[in-house]
Amino acid sequence: MRKKVLVLGSNFGGLTAALAVKHELHGDVDVTVVSTSDRFLFNPSLIWLPFGKRRPEDISFPVAPTFEGHGIEFIHAGATAIDPDRRTVTVAAGGPAGTTHRYDYLVIATGYRNRLDVVPGLADNAVTITTLPDAIKAGEAWQRFLHDPGPVVVAATQGAGCFGAAYEFLFNISHQLRKAGIKKRVKLTYVSAEPFLGHFGIGGLPHGESLLKMFLRKENIDAHLGGPIDHVASDAVVLGDGTEIPFSYAMIVPPFAGQEVVARTGTLSDDKGYVPVRDTYQSRKYDDVYAVGVAAAVDVPWQTPTPVGIPKTGFPTEVMAHTAAANIVAQIRGAEPAHTKAFGDIKAVCVMDAGNNGVIILADKMLPPRKHGVLIPGPQAHLMKLGFEKYFLWKARHGYVTLP
Ligand SMILES: Cc1cc2nc3c(=O)[nH]c(=O)nc-3n(C[C@H](O)[C@H](O)[C@H](O)COP(=O)(O)OP(=O)(O)OC[C@H]3O[C@@H](n4cnc5c(N)ncnc54)[C@H](O)[C@@H]3O)c2cc1C
């Protein structure tokens, strides 16, 4: 009997894992992908969407043709229940009770949901850019702001991990204000739970803090670091120490949590809805359940006065998905799942865009201790992000997951 691999989620982690298993085993395995979204979304370009630099269709593509072209079944529906003891997943499709799908191996790549409730008033008074509908709303608010400009706040709350997106949006806003001819009259403020500038949720990199300080000084941006946000009023972000920062436009990155279907599965999930995993990306509890990308729990190796999360970005997500796929292939072939890559040991490869400028971030490891880490500022970083977006969308759409 051919083994059945079920993959939940069809973005960076799910698409890569499903195609990598199929690529290796071809007709010797059945692969099914179940996903709430029928489009792949290149989330890194959400930073440009509010300014009209990208439309949703520019940064996404339908996944069904990609999967069908590679002999993978695709079901456009959400997983509503996982029973790891019975090896079944209930999917909200095919009737009110849904349908039950059996698996031999399960890959959970369901990513994140926003925790907007962490700061009172955030959902009602500010915008965020971490999902496509949120970024569309942030764009509508930006158009209103341009008609009646005032102070701007860009923030990442206590517990947030996606600091790169906050920095990118901050510098893109500065660039857009300049283009609109209103840079001089708009006060721009950055608020972050990071203990210092350029911490990025990965402990910082050599010269990162001084580089970010220089960027902020050059762009005339004030920063409030290391403290929590108490609440967001209709016209001001109020910090834990009582400082009020007025705004006409506020974009705030919240913490993430795992999807509810995972959080509801007590034997699989931690208290944030993520799946604790081994370095093979198998669940700590079940040998036949894997979790990759944002869905996988990663231990934060430090304590900061205000909690900060870890950015589980696209590159490590792909590495986790390939590692999980290689182990599933090994298990199907009757071998031990011996491929390992601890999250902290994955290379850090990232580009922080700043509108017409940016910083290339490279390190031998995501988390310290590291041997090498470097930040390379300059306009080539912006061009690199533009090129990478096109390349990645092409690669993913064609299912060429074995390419770098
Ligand atoms: C604004 C922003 C900017 C970013 N910039 C960068 C960057 O510059 N570089 C970088 O490397 N990374 C960046 N990232 C991070 C990157 O987007 C993530 O690493 C990546 O999206 C993680 O992929 P994933 O597959 O784990 O999760 P996701 O991309 O969240 O995908 C989850 C998938 O699961 C599906 N799903 C959800 N719930 C269910 C369910 N119940 N049943 C079935 N399917 C479900 C969703 O539809 C989706 O297909 C950025 C993220 C954001 C938000």
Image (cartoon, grey):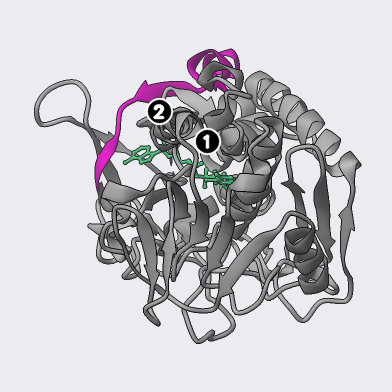
Tell me: is circle 2 under 8 Å from ligand 1: yes
Q: Is residue 153 visible?
A: yes
Q: Which residue occupies 37% across, 49% down?
A: 126
* Cα distance between the residues tagged 1 and 2: 9 Å
> In the drawing, does residue 246 fall left or right of residue 311?
left
Residue placed under numbered mark 1 in the picture: 11
Q: Nearer the viewer, residue 34 or 231?
A: 231
Tell me: is circle 1 under 8 Å from ligand 1: yes
Where does the N terminus fall, quadrant-wise? top left
Looking at the rendered structure, the kind of residue marked 2 is Ser
Circle number at residue 37: 2
* Extreme residue in the left direction: 96
Query: Quarter of the image holding residue 196?
Result: bottom right
Q: Determine contact: label 1, label 2, CB under 8 Å.
A: yes
Q: Is residue 244 magenta?
A: no
Q: Which residues are magenta?
A: 60-81
Query: Quarter of the image holding residue 246?
Result: bottom left
Q: Which residue occupies 43% across, 53% down?
A: 247
- Mark 1 Cα within 10 Å, few/some/many (few <14, many 20+)? many
- Mark 2 Cα within 10 Å, few/some/many (few <14, many 20+)? some
Q: Nearer the viewer, residue 188 or 99?
A: 188
In the rendered image, residue 43, in percent from the top left (x then y), is placed at 56, 37
Q: Is residue 66 magenta?
A: yes
SS at circle 2: loop
Looking at the rendered structure, the kind of residue marked 1 is Asn
Q: Which residue occupies 34% across, 57% down?
A: 115
Q: Nearer the viewer, residue 306 or 335?
A: 306
Q: Which residue occupies 59% across, 13% down?
A: 69
SS at circle 1: loop
Q: Earlier in the sequence, mark 1 or mark 2?
A: 1
> In the drawing, does residue 72 fall left or right of residue 329?
left
